[in-house]
Image: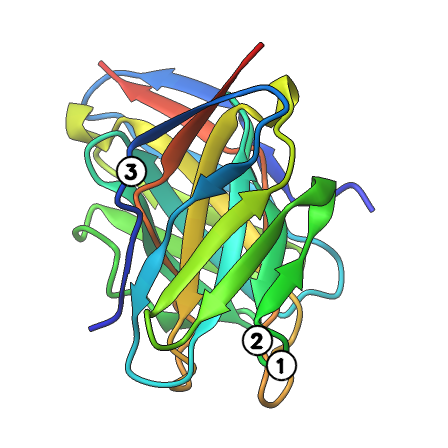
Amino acid sequence: AQSVAQPEDQVNVAEGNPLTVKCTYSVSGNPYLFWYVQYPNRGLQFLLKYITGDNLVKGSYGFEAEFNKSQTSFHLKKPSALVSDSALYFCAAYSGAGSYQLTFGKGTKLSVIP
Amino acid sequence: DAGVIQSPRHEVTEMGQEVTLRCKPISGHDYLFWYRQTMMRGLELLIYFNNNVPIDDSGMPEDRFSAKMPNASFSTLKIQPSEPRDSAVYFCASSPLRLSSSYNEQFFGPGTRLTVL
């Protein structure tokens, strides 16, 4: 069975510092990986995805993610955090085995401290 | 495009009552998904449709839950009878047709916060 793990429930970072939100995955086929952000009382918003190709994926709001096949990781990064980046971040994966089920991690709460 | 539309945004009901949640997907999207979000269990996929046909309902917790998609622009999730443990935020999402060797992102609605007393 496929799974997505986000090992940190919460990440705190000072404004202006780089941030990293970690994600590891376990899928049976080729991984198709996504990051979503959820602001309070809102639905999830798509940030970026990895399908194939370059291991560094660029997305919305200055976020990027690095795909590492050997470590089965897809960490979300941003060079300089903003207070407005404070939100709940979800990593998700399709297994690529014909199923359209998107498996989500439990989420990581990011707090950017002014 | 207005995005995925869900109604109501908030629903408070009493145990035993029937609850109907509604969703309008983005026009032209072929897939529709219903999720439930709770603190304890995170985001769970309940059911998804392709071209109005239910494909996988293995996530539906029990027979009290049912979902329909009578046409491409409307879906409902019904709980009858409702129980306090059904309290959660229910999200609807839609996605365009999957291209070969690719998967498209899902677009989420704002959710319905259900409280069953």
Mark 2, residue position: A51
Q: Disc 2 on helix, strand or loop? A: loop
Subunit ID for the residue under disc 2: A
- Residue receiving disc 1: A53
Circle nearer the viewer, 2 or 1: 1
Residue A5 is situated, as x and y percent measured from the top left of the image, at: 27, 53
Whole-percent x and y of residue A41?
Answer: 51, 22
| Chain holding disc 3 | A
- Mark 2 → mark 1, Cα distance in angstroms: 7 Å
Pointers 2 and 3 in contact (CB under 8 A)? no
Left or right position of B8 against A69:
right
Spot occupied by residue A112 in the image (x, y as percentages of width and height): 52, 20
Circle 1: is it few (<14), some (14-19), or many (20+) Cα within 10 Å? few
Instruction: Using the image as rendered, state which of residue A26 and residue B49 is in the foreground.
Output: A26
Are discs 2 and 1 less than 8 Å apart at CB? yes
Residue B39 at least partly seen: yes
Residue type marked 3:
Glu
Q: Residue at x 30, y 43 (%)?
A: A106
Q: Answer with the quarter of the image where residue A73 lies.
A: bottom left
